[in-house]
Amino acid sequence: MDKIKELERKSRARNTAWTVAVFALLVLWAVIVLFPFYWMLLTSVKSYASYNAEYVPKFFTLSPTIENYVQAFTAVPLAKYFVNTIIFTIVTTGLMLIIVVLSAFAFSRLEFKGKNLVFTLFLSLMMIPNELVIITNFVTITNAGLRNSFAGLILPSVTSVFYIYLLKENFEQIPDELYKAAKVDGTSDFKYLWKVMIPICRPTIVTVVILKVIECWNSYVWPRLITDDENYFLVSNGIQTIRESGFGRENIPAMMAAVVVISVPLIILFLIFHKKIMEGVSRGGTKG
């Protein structure tokens, strides 16, 4: 009996030690990951004079200021970049969602000749390097005369093979009997999609929307390539413009303030919906 109690005590001690070690590693990893954000926020509230006076960087400040945020919006058209990005994000995400949902429904429920072959060829597009796609898109958009326009920014981003695949896998988890019963009742495909499939797969659809919003908000290469008119710059290109200008290179605190303003919406979005993102991804990758 004493030996059993001793083994139980040692087992609890090992479990406790393991839990403490894992917790310590997680805390250390969290500090490493969050420190750049803390440093960015700290720098953004330091005055220009105090920042330049620091020969050794300080990890805190006793006199925070919002002057840098005011300068970030007045020295460059940051508000205009915000509006452009919001328009680009909303329109692109909306069009992409329509295309992705309809495509996933067609591949998961409709029967047509060569469906499997078409879907296989469709998936093979994921193996094409993005650089080749960008070159093709650039030539196409330029020849169509859509450079420096929202249409040129939006059109190459309104579809995604990965999101179609993710949603198709999720749609296929819905029993075929529901679809057959709906067809017997005279329900149209579109009504079945709208009334049955979309409500059931809402977590995955929400995940696709959130990931697309993040992708659009962080979009840099394509907008930088297809636009050289500041009237169509997005926030990512705006930050690059600020950095390349004398203002951004000289006034680092104001530059960090602009980065904070641009980063906060995505951070808030992820904190609110991170559970739905995990749930949607797990549902999309599980069959049965």
Image (spheres, rainbow, N blue to C red):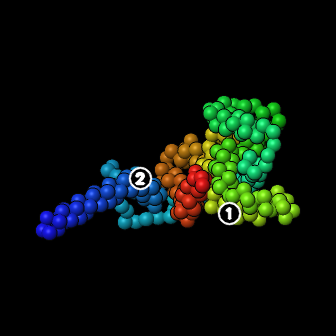
Label 1 packing within 10 angstroms: few (<14), some (14-19), many (20+): some
Q: Which image quarter is the C terminus in?
A: bottom right
Q: Camera-side residue: 74 or 282?
A: 282
Instruction: Please report contact status of discs 2 and 1: CB closer than 8 Å, yes or no.
Output: no
Q: Position of residue 235 (x, y in %)?
A: 62, 51
Mark 1: amino acid = Ile
Tell me the mark number nearer the camera, choosing from 2 and 1. 1
Q: State the CA–CA distance, disc 2 to disc 1.
A: 35 Å
State which quadrant residue 192 falls in: bottom right
Q: Which residue is at a point 66% across and 46% down the rendered structure image?
A: 165
Left or right side of 92 for 287: left
Left or right, 214 with respect to 93, comes to: left
Q: Residues within 10 Å of mark 2 (few under 14, many from 20)?
A: few
For mark 2, what is the residue?
33
Residue at the front extreme of this rendering: 1
Residue 52 percent coordinates (x, y): 40, 51
Give the labeled residue for mark 1.
200
Q: Quadrant of the N terminus?
A: bottom left
Residue at the spot x=72%, y=39% of the render? 116
Residue 97 vs residue 43, the one in the foreground: 97
Question: Which residue occupies the foreground of this view, 121 or 261?
Answer: 121
Residue type at numbered disc 2? Val
In x, y percent, where is residue 279?
56, 60
Q: Earlier in the sequence, mark 2 or mark 1?
A: 2
Mark 2 lies on a secondary structure that is helix
Q: Is residue 262 visible?
A: no
Instruction: Classify 60 as above or below 121.
Output: below
Q: Residue at x 36, y 53 (%)?
A: 29
Instruction: Give the residue displayed 87% in from the left and 62% down from the top.
Output: 186
Q: How many marks?
A: 2
Residue 126 in sight from this viewpoint: yes
